[in-house]
Amino acid sequence: MALSTDIMRGGFSSGAARAIQGQANGALAAAGTTQATATLIAQSIVAVTSGTGGVRLPSGNIGDEVEVLNLNTADITIYPPTSEQINNLAANAGFLLGQYTAVKVKKFTATRWMGFLSA
């Protein structure tokens, strides 16, 4: 994706450029032990830096992307929105994201997300 300064050179305002790029949260805390009690992700780019348990992807539209970096000292669980699935996991099932790793998930159908894990 282009830098926001490149987007502004294309005629968009700084606010529109930031909206296109998405919002970031550099200090999200994981919580909960189930999909229903996991911390809801409200930005498109997040770093989990504390807590135990999991985070839940927001409801989204086809093409939406969320990037999660686990800077926590423990593994966390990434859950999909209710009745949705990530990769080939069962609906509502989460997956463990190891400490100091990242995942980019992209919604590609009405109920399915694909995940791309970092090394």
Image (spheres, rainbow, N blue to C red):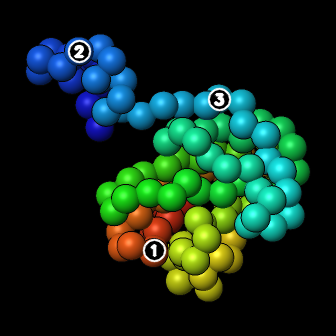
In the image, residue 109 sits, relative to residue 24, either above or below, namely below
Residue 74 seen: no
N-terminal-most mark, 3 or 2: 2
**Which residue is nearer to you in this view: 24 or 75?**
24
Above or below residue 30? Residue 14 is above
Residue depicted at 45% across the width and 68% down the height? 114
The residue singled out by tag 1 in the image is 112
Q: Which mark is residue 26?
A: 3
State the residue position of label 2.
13
Instruction: Tell me the kind of residue under disc 1.
Output: Arg
Q: In this view, does 64 lie to the left or right of 98?
A: left
Give the number of the disc on residue 11. Answer: none
Residue 83 is left or right of residue 77, and the answer is left
> Which kind of residue does numbered mark 2 sit on?
Ser
Determine whether the residue tagged by mark 2 lies in a helix, strand or loop: loop
Report the Cα–Cα distance between label 1 and label 3: 26 Å
Specify the quadrant of the image occupied by residue 83.
Answer: bottom right
Query: Residue 73, percent across and down?
Result: 85, 44
3D distance between C-alphas at marks 3 and 2: 24 Å
Local SS, label 3: strand
